[in-house]
Image: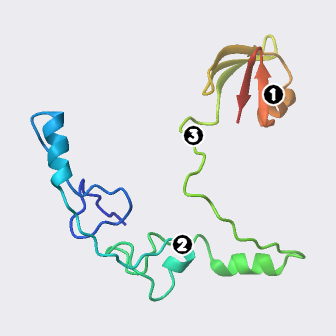
Amino acid sequence: MEDPQPPLASSEVRYVGEAVAVVVAADATTARDAADLLEVNYEVLPAVADARAAVKLGAPFVSPLAADNLGASAVFDDASVTADAFAACDVVVEHDFRVPRVANAQMEARGALGAYDSATHSYLMIWWPRSVSRAHYSAQPHSRRTWLATPSCTTGSKTLGR
């Protein structure tokens, strides 16, 4: 679904803070004076703020491009295979998870670039997205796996969270 987001609201304001007007002036004082003259009248429209309530029959439309308020839906694999797998389980735990609108999502990857030196049986970490560069770690692949899998790791005075 591609719902265009114009720079200004046209027929409907869809969220608090959506821009509704622009003032162009020769200087800041004139712009402020002109902005003070603006008057916007709003008609309160039906709204829905809960995702589950938004997909119920009769819920107010969030976008004209999604009459059922569902932005995307996908089925992966054969649903009967999944149902059979759950049916074969001794215990199935179900839980509803609520994810806040703001979620922790760093842009840098959680990976590293490095090289293994077979002569010394050691690893050279060349690049790590958390500001560690050219740090040398010695031997034993399993110790590196354990180190990389810990909730935080320390090299010198830097503590790196993952």
Q: Which residue is mark 3?
A: 106
Q: Secondary structure at mark 1?
A: helix
* C-alpha span from label 3 to label 2: 24 Å
Residue 93 placement (x, y as % from top left): 82, 72
Three-letter amino acid code at the position of disc 1: Arg
Farthest residue, direction left:
26
- Which badge, 2 or 1, comes first in the chain's sequence? 2
Q: Which kind of residue does numbered mark 3 sit on?
A: Gln
**Up-down relation of residue 158 to residue 143 (above or below):** above
Residue 133: % across, % down: 63, 16
Contact check, label 3 and label 2, Cβ < 8 Å = no
Label 2 sits on a secondary structure element that is helix
The image shows residue 24 at horizontal and vertical percentages of: 13, 43
Residue drawn at the location 25% of the way across and 61% of the way down: 9
User: What residue sits right under mark 1 in the picture?
Assistant: 144
Q: Is residue 77 left or right of residue 30?
A: right
Q: Residue at x 20, y 50 (%)?
A: 36
